[in-house]
Image: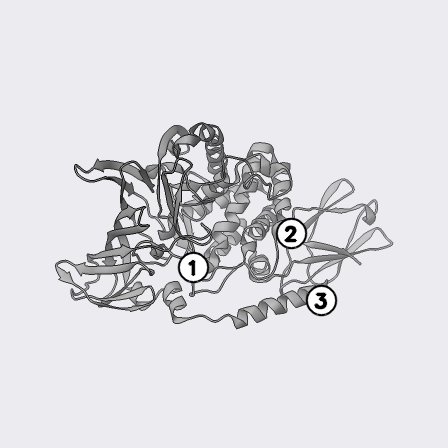
Amino acid sequence: MKKLIVLLCLVSLSVAQAQEFTKQDTLRGSITPERAWWDLSYYDLNVKVQPEEKAIAGYNIIRYKVLEEHDVIQIDLQEPLKITGISQGDQQLDYSKIGPAYFINLKKKQIPGEYNELYVQYVGKPKEAVRAPWDGGFSWKKDDNGKHFIATSCQGLGASVWWPNKDHMYDEVDSMRIAIDVPKDLVAVANGRLRETYEYEQGDYKLYEWFVSNPINNYGVNINIGDYVHFGEKYDGEKGVLDLDYYVLRDNLEKAKEQFKDVPRLMKAFEHWFGPYPFYEDSFKLVEVPYLGMEHQSSVTYGNQFQNGYLGRDLSKSGWGMKFDYIIIHEAGHEWFANNITYKDIADMWVHEGFTTYSEALYVDYHFGEQAGNEYAIGIRGNIRNESPIIGVYDVNQRGSGDMYPKGANMLHALRQVIHDDEKWRSILRGLNKDFYHQTVTTQQVENYISEKAEMDFSKVFDQYLRTIKIPVFEYKIEADNAITYRYTNVVDGFAMPIRIFADDKELWLKPTTEWQTEKVKHGAAAFTMDPNFYVEVKEL
């Protein structure tokens, strides 16, 4: 086993060393000088969607606050889309370009403290998604009645795949308008609330104007177009009455009315564990799309075919995964961890996916009991591969391993056990959403917060599970005098996570380190059992 672990570490290291990053990776993934000097305030995005041509055209007005003097600003837009005009006030601006990064030469003096606007026009046929949402872009599909069924998705790839913006996660606008022109036989749904619709006197298009009144990350912005029908309900939540709105294809209305009963249930569970839904002002929407789903803020997209589990499968193999619709629960959980609390760098994507995968277990816990939630969390360990670390490479737009989902969740599940006080653990989860409300964060901020509020130093636990592929091994020996001798191996220096065993029909807490220790057990060490809620391997010597 040790040889295998060493081999995996060497393979992971060699892959990381072989990874080469380009200047474009840095321009995409870092806070460049041309990004750092200004702070986003408002986007006014206007897009005309032409389904027959698979083309779009529009503009984005970018309002920003000047933080320091500068004369070049970076705006991103990915090919094959093209910027056709850039202006500030009545002045047309020229630019240079490296890949998707446009470096625009400003003529107006940028005075710190002032707010300015940039008007960016663009046109083209955007990248078509091959395997949305993992390979993003535009999904151009048709429903069973032959009507256009269209959606966007862009996490990781970048929002600049379909609209011009400051394409880095560290900076969010305070609010946003999204106006979509679509053929008048279709409905366009975006983030926030629908402010108005406008049907032109001439032509075959109709305008849908949506407004987001809360800060929003750029990959959370989406547009969805189809032959939608709408229904909704009211939820009496922690901050008052929350509007729950649902948009589904006309033929799926009755199925959706049954399947979407999970939404009030998830609100009840998640407001209990995480605090109030973070976007009451913008409502909560669940929108059917032609791909599996995505956590677009206040416009969660859904394509799980109106069935429980993950496309009808239980990812935990515990049975509990078939008690709910995976996409509804998981993607809505991101409203707290992804949309309310957002990573600054995609290398820290575990903050989104680890917490949200763990939210599935907490949903089960809330509705079916703690043991059920434990079984679900333990069950998803079967999906962990441990081929590379959870945290990616910073400043080059590289996410970490897909283990960020089940492994991140199981690390959090273990922390809950160590804290051994569910009210304190709940206060930490709620506190994260309160103290980092509508903010972008780093892993270090989250780690420090949990350790501080728990009054325990978890830094080595985070290092172990987030930054290595090594799983702690709890080694033990049964001694002749009714004692257990034990230690940790395969751990980072200083790793000393407490662990619980059960002996003599009682729980017993051990504090293993890499040094051997001995604990006497009254009625025989051979009768002890390990608590399976800790993600460690157990080895008897």
Assess whether mark 3 and mark 1 are in contact (beta carbons under 8 angstroms).
Answer: no
Label at residue 345: 1
Cα–Cα gap, marks 2 and 1? 27 Å
Residue 176 in view: no
Label at residue 322: none
Q: Amino acid at mark 2?
A: Tyr
Query: In this picture, is 1 found above or below 214?
Result: below
Report crowding for label 2: few under 14, some 14 to 19, many 20 or more residues within 10 A (C-alpha). Answer: some
Assess whether mark 3 and mark 2 are in contact (beta carbons under 8 angstroms).
Answer: no
- Indicate the secondary structure of the residue bearing disc 1: loop
Viewer-nearest of labels 2 and 3? 3
- Indicate the secondary structure of the residue bearing disc 3: helix
Cα–Cα gap, marks 2 and 3? 20 Å
Query: In this picture, is 214 found above or below 469?
Result: above
Q: Residue 104 placed where, x, y %?
A: 24, 66
Q: Circle 3 sits on which residue?
A: 3
Viewer-nearest of labels 1 and 3? 3
- Relative to 369, 97 lies left or right: left
Assess whether mark 1 and mark 2 are in contact (beta carbons under 8 angstroms).
Answer: no
Q: Residue 42 placed where, x, y %?
A: 26, 51
Label at residue 535: 2
Q: Amino acid at mark 3?
A: Lys
- Indicate the secondary structure of the residue bearing disc 2: loop
